[in-house]
Amino acid sequence: MKRERDGVGPEGDLAVRTHLPTPPAWMRWLPLLYVVAVLLLEPVTPVDWPVSFVLIALPLVTAFAHGPTAVACATVGAIVLEGLLAGTPCCAGRPVGYLWDRHYVAAYVCTALVGALGMAVAAHRTRRERTLADVRFVAEVAQRVLLKPVPHRLGGLALDSLYLAAAAEARIGGDLYEAVLTRCGVRLVIGDVRGKGLLAVETAGAMLAAFREAAHDEPGLPGLADRVERSMSRRAAQLGGSETGERFVTAVFVEVPLGEHVVRVVNCGHPPPLRIRPGDVRELDRGRSGPPLNLGMLVPDPFRVDTYSFRPGDELLLFTDGVTETRNADGRFYPLAERLASWGPLDPEKLLDRLHRDLLVYSGDQLQDDTAALAAHRLPDEPTASAEPAASTGPTTPAGPTEQQ
């Protein structure tokens, strides 16, 4: 399990070569430890009990973590060591004639046969690991195409994103997020597609495409949500089947207008965002959440916009239910708001890094659902280039929006 950052390879290069996973250290050192154990047992056992016979298994032990070449070397080494222990008086206390005893010759032949089998096993394991590495690499590329890294700075906001796939080998799922700069301000979305597998990934891609297009055209946030809703409904109808009405996406649409210290939210059945201030973590929820996308036909007015204060220094955290539904060993849900309040103010990158680590520790590295999060920090207002210093006759109070929740 790892946090997805801004590129798969150096400088975001997706065309880097895949690398085989590195086996654990104990597995790499196991052949040597096996030989050491044999050498320690041989002098203390009776001559009639040749412990060296267990060296027949050394090629297979080597095949667990090493390639065919290493297995071949281990096979030759095992045969040589068997011969030394069989016919060297100083090592095992046996006369030289034991070297060609039929039991030892049989051990040499068995070791060679097991070595050939170990080479085949190692070659097969290496091919499977290479295939798995290629599949994971393709999944990473697909994830990067689906979820492009958000800019670190956009329209007066500092941004960062987090994505964790519950299936570590897949690294791809149905959670989604995006941030775009429009003439109306910065618009954000985070969503969670119902279901798993390729259908969920395809649905997430279709929704992101609809959002990226509509975010620049729709003047209002409810209109943006409605347009994405219609796109999702058309796609569900095209798929057909008996579950058309159940193919839905929970989502939150957010707009941070330029030059205004407010944030507008349209919630479509999704966990509400959290606004983070020093000593205050608050859910941006007035209980007017609409239905998930593709279920908007169930209510007459599905998309209602709520406005909240969002001053410089404030931070917004959008997340999927994979965060709050993470459980510990006792079955308790992850207390996100409590954790955020205890950490204090953090910039988006540090906040999501800490959230990532804390989720893995809390769950015992056993996340059960895909997890996505998007953090947005409101930067201080930049002075206009045309502003002239003026003589001050007294303290002034900056004008700003009235505090809303």
Image (cartoon, grey):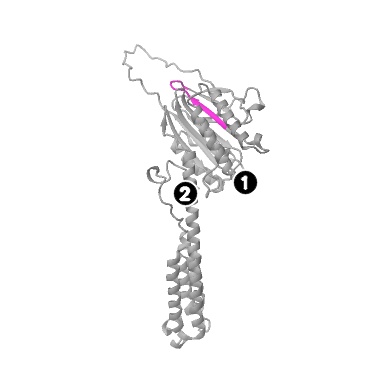
Q: Which residue is mark 1?
A: 330
Camera-side residue of 77 and 115? 115
| Left or right relative to 120: residue 380 | left
> What residue is drawn where x is 41% and y is 83%?
90
Is residue 254 inside the magenta stretch? Answer: yes
Q: Which mark is residue 232?
A: none
Give how far across and how far down residue 240 sits, in percent.
64, 37
Give how far across and how far down residue 33 sits, in percent.
46, 68
Camera-side residue of 205 and 260? 205
Q: How many marks?
A: 2
Q: Which residue is mark 2?
A: 137
Is residue 298 inside the magenta stretch? Answer: no
Which residue lies most toward the right here? Answer: 242
Query: In the image, which is nearer the foreground, mark 2 or mark 1?
Result: 2
Give how far across and how far down residue 219 sits, in percent.
50, 21
**Element at label 2:** helix
Could you tell me if residue 234 is visible in this image? yes
Camera-side residue of 296 and 384? 296
> What residue is drawn where x is 42% and y is 15%?
397
Q: Is residue 9 above or below residue 318?
A: below
Residue 201 figure quarter: top right
Q: Is residue 142 above or below residue 232?
A: below
Give how far across and how far down residue 266 sits, in percent.
56, 26
Q: Residues within 10 Å of mark 1 (few under 14, many from 20)?
A: few
**Element at label 1:** loop
| Left or right relative to 244: residue 372 | left
Q: Circles 2 and 1: CB distance less than 8 Å?
A: no
Please give the range of residues in magenta.
251-261
The residue type indicated by label 1 comes to Asp
